[in-house]
Amino acid sequence: MTARLGILLSGSGSTYANLQAQIQQGTLDAEIALVIASRPQAGGLQQAADWGHPWLVSRDQETIQQGLVDHGCDWVAMCGFMSRFDPRGPLSGRVLNVHPSLLPAFGGQGFYGDHVHRAVLQRGARVSGCTVHLVAGDYDSGPILAQRIVPVHGSDSVESLRQRVQAAERHLYPLVLQSLICHGYHGSADLTLVNGCDAWDLGFTTAPAAL
C-alpha cells in the first residue's frame, strides 16, 4: 500500500527532492501528500508547485499538526525543518528527521547544517555520519532508527565533510522510510533496513555515547 508522506522543510528542499526522486524511481512506496515550509522564501515551495504537491507555510504547531492530519499523512519526513515540532496524537511516532551527525553527539539546539560539521572538525573527531530518528519534543531527540558512519579525513574542510555526510543521508533516509512503510515501527531502536521490502542489515543501528 502506498504511504501518504508529509514533508517539513525550511530551505532549498534538496532532501525533499531526493525523496521525490526515489518515489519516481519506484524505490520508495509513497506519495507526497503535503509540503509545509516554515518560511515563505523556502526554495522547496517552488519544487512543490512544480510537482503539483499541496503546500502551506506555517510555524504554528497546531496548524502544522492539523494540516498533516487533514491530508491523511501516514508518515512525515523532516527535510531541513528549522522549527521545533512536537508531534502528538495520530502523528506521535510517525515523524522522522535526518541529522548530520552520529547522535547523541553534536545534537541539540544550535547544531544544524555546517554548524555540526564545523564542530566535528574542531573537536578532532575521526568519524561523523548521519542519524535517522523519530521526532520527540526536544531538538534531535527521539528513538534512533539508523545511522551511517562517515570517516573524517585530516584534509577535510566543512564543505568536503558536508558533501560526504549529505551523500550518506541521501542513501539512508529513503531506506529507513521504506522500511517503516513496509513493516512499521515496533518500539525497538534496532531497525532492520530493507530495500523493496526484502530485509538486509546495514549495520548502522547503534548510537555511540560520544565521538
Image (spheres, rainbow, N blue to C red):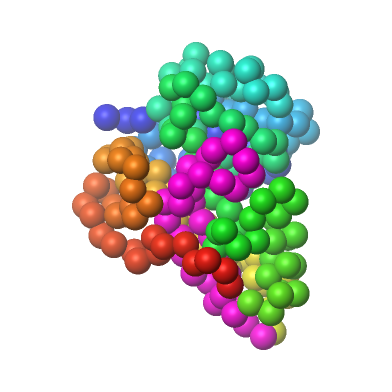
Q: Is residue 163 left or right of residue 98?
A: right
Q: Is residue 44 left or right of residue 75?
A: right
Residue 159 or 186: which is nearer the viewer? 186
Residue 202 or 51: which is nearer the viewer? 202
Which quarter of the image is occupied by the C terminus?
bottom right
At 47% across and 26% down in the image, what residue appears? 91
At 26% across and 60% down in the image, what residue appears? 200
Please check the rendered image and state whether residue 58 is part of the magenta-colored stretch, yes or no.
Answer: no
Residue 46 in sight: no
Residues shaded magenta: 126-154
Q: Is residue 90 left or right of residue 54?
A: left
Q: Residue furthest right?
A: 41
Q: Residue furthest front?
A: 209
Please check the rendered image and state whether residue 145 is part of the magenta-colored stretch, yes or no.
Answer: yes
At 59% across and 31% down in the image, what residue appears? 86
At 62% across and 66% down in the image, what residue appears? 163
Residue 67 in sight: yes
Q: Position of residue 187 (x, y in %)?
A: 34, 42
- Looking at the picture, does residue 90 appear above or below residue 172? above
Q: Position of residue 51 (x, y in %)?
A: 54, 30
